[in-house]
């Protein structure tokens, strides 16, 4: 579930029309603005809530945490002390003492994490997806545009692809992603909701490397 976070979101007639068209130019204009906005920030930080809904056993697992992003660097701290830190080239995956006091280091894989960071999600529509407008929704007095993305795959590819839809909630006034939700064929649902978003904050580069000296006795497994 946590890797998914690094990884992260409603009118049937519209679905029929734009499933045939493939890509709605009005939706593209909205997504272009979201991408432009998120990439205009030198840095940002936020709190988040992530939820996995497992259809097979009827369980729900919720995780909260904090996210700091600066360019291609990020630092995610989960409520249980687990941290994932990236300096753009390497990732440190740290588990605290009550979870083994270990850190695994590996190189960034550009193929992974595509649904996890707001920047990646904001750009994913540009290649390999169809999209259409689902409507508007008001939450806590804020108006959101709801957009569905569907992987643009051949019939054969669809048979082997578990994800069939990604639903985005876009804050209309700020042009930022509030929430994204991933739908799988097996009934599982994965969602991330962003809270307390602050842009262009001063984040020192030391936040994006793991300091072994601050973790006495930590077991290091370097996979690079």
Image: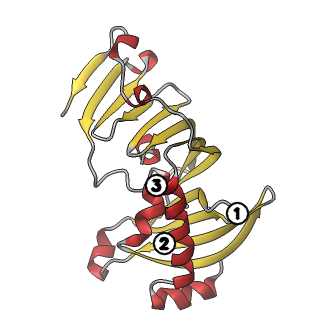
Asked whether the beta carbons under mark 1 and mark 2 sit within 8 Å of each other, the answer is no
Residue with the mark numbered 1:
173
Q: Measure how far apart labels 3 and 2 are at the Cα level.
A: 16 Å
Residue with the mark numbered 3:
119
Give the class, few, some or many, for how many residues have Cα within 10 Å of label 1's Cα (few <14, many ≥20). few
Q: Which mark is residue 149?
A: 2
Q: Position of residue 8 (x, y in %)?
A: 49, 53
Q: Quadrant of the N terminus?
A: top left
At numbered mark 2, what does the secondary structure look like: helix, strand or loop?
strand
Q: Residue 98 sits in which quadrant?
A: top left
**Marker count (numbered):** 3
Q: Position of residue 12 (x, y in %)?
A: 62, 83
Going from N to C along the chain, the mark reached first, 3 or 2, is: 3
Going from N to C along the chain, the mark reached first, 1 or 3, is: 3
Q: Quadrant of the C terminus?
A: top left
Q: Position of residue 28 (x, y in %)?
A: 51, 77
At numbered mark 3, what does the secondary structure look like: helix, strand or loop?
helix
């Amino acid at each position: 579930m946590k890797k998914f976070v690094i990884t992260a979101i409603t009118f049937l007639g519209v679905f029929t029309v734009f499933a045939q068209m493939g890509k709605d130019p009005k939706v593209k204009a909205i997504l272009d603005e979201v991408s432009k906005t998120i990439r205009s920030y030198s840095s940002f930080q936020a709190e988040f809530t992530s939820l996995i809904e497992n259809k097979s056993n009827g369980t729900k697992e919720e995780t909260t945490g904090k996210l700091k992003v600066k360019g291609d660097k990020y630092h995610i701290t989960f409520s249980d002390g687990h941290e994932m830190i990236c300096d753009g080239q390497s990732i440190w995956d740290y588990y605290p003492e009550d979870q083994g006091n270990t850190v695994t280091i590996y190189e960034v894989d550009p193929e992974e994490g595509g649904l996890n960071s707001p920047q990646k999600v904001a750009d994913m529509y540009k290649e390999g997806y169809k999209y259409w407008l689902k409507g508007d929704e008001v939450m806590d007095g804020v108006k959101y545009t709801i957009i569905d993305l569907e992987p643009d795959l051949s019939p054969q590819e669809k048979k082997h692809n578990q994800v069939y839809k990604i639903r985005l909630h876009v804050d209309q006034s700020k042009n930022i992603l509030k929430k994204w939700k991933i739908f799988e064929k097996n009934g599982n649902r994965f969602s991330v909701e962003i809270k307390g978003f602050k842009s262009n904050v001063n984040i020192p580069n030391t936040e994006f490397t793991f300091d072994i000296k601050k973790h006495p006795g930590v077991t290091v497994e370097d996979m690079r």
